[in-house]
Image (cartoon, rainbow, N blue to C red):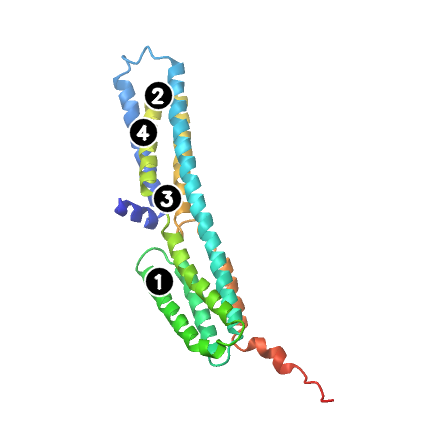
Amino acid sequence: MSELGQWLLTAPIWAIGIVIYLGMLIAAFAGAKLRKRFVDSDAERSHNEEGYVVSSVMGLLALLVGFTFALAIDRYDTRRAVVLQEANAIGTTYLRTQLLDEPHRTRLSRLLIAYTQNRVELARKQVGADQEVRLATSDAMIVELWQATVAAFPSIETRPFSGSYLTTMNEMIDMDAARQQSRRSHVPMEVFVLLVVYQMIAAGVLGYVLVGRRGRTTASLLLILFGGSLLLVIDIDRPNSGGIVETQKPMELLLEMMRQNPAGSFDRVARTATPRPEQ
């Protein structure tokens, strides 16, 4: 089961589509062959009964696809929300870092910029060795960020914002675990297996019941629609590959802001302010 899940996460969508449609085509062809074999024993069955069979099978398949689609959309929305939350946490930490004294301000600011850059690149990597390297780099940067925070804390311990600075730094670190968990959260593989198996059964039923040119055309359209729906669900459930991926725009905008406003740039007002003449 784990090998199947890994394949669904890494294989190209077109390859998965070929497997699914080929399986449905074989199932429909097998159903048509069974129809021809047992045509004598099925001669008394009415057209209405066949319609009831098709309606029942397609109705249950639509229910299963809709249920799986809702699960995938829920996880996709969670991943998008976590990206925005992490961008807000890093941005708040970066702004509060500008209140630190040197050299802590410059050191932590550079670490935050590098950390954000790595997070953006990590989100673009597909499952594999490159992603593991980026993930290990992210973990190492988190340790380095906290070490730099520990080194800077004695200089801000007596200041009013020291507690809030530690809080935002902790929130930023916690968001790393939240994003990792959101990426590991997928539609249960058992649900996908059940859906694929039932879709193959439905294809066999359509091939058995729908005969003639009109029936084959109807069966083909139904199989194309339900196969496309299944591929859409699989695509949505993949966090960083395929046609539908979580947007990294909040993180990219944050990275651009930090690069445009490096450590010390927020002191321009204080440096250019004209001192009042002594009375």
Residue furthest front as drawn? 158
Reading the image, the residue beneath label 1 is 135
2 and 4 marks in contact (CB < 8 Å): no
Tell me the distance, in whole angstroms, between the alpha carbons under discs 2 and 3: 32 Å
The three-letter amino acid code for the residue at tag 3 is Val
Mark 2 or 3 closer to N-term?
Answer: 3
Disc 4 vs disc 1: which is toward the camera? 1
* Quarter placement of the C terminus: bottom right
Q: Residue at x 30, y 27 (%)?
A: 29
Can residue 277 be seen in this snapshot?
A: yes
Q: Describe the element under mark 2 as helix, strand or loop.
A: helix
Q: Describe the element under mark 1 as helix, strand or loop.
A: helix
* Quarter placement of the N terminus: top left
Along the line of sight, the residue nearer the viewer: 135 or 227: 135
Reading the image, the residue beneath label 2 is 209
Q: Residue at x 39, y 58 (%)?
A: 177
Mark 4 or 3 closer to N-term?
Answer: 3
Tell me the distance, in whole angstroms, between the alpha carbons under discs 2 and 4: 12 Å
Q: Residue 153, located in which quarter of the rendered image? A: bottom left
The three-letter amino acid code for the residue at tag 4 is Ile
Q: Residue at x 33, y 50 (%)?
A: 10
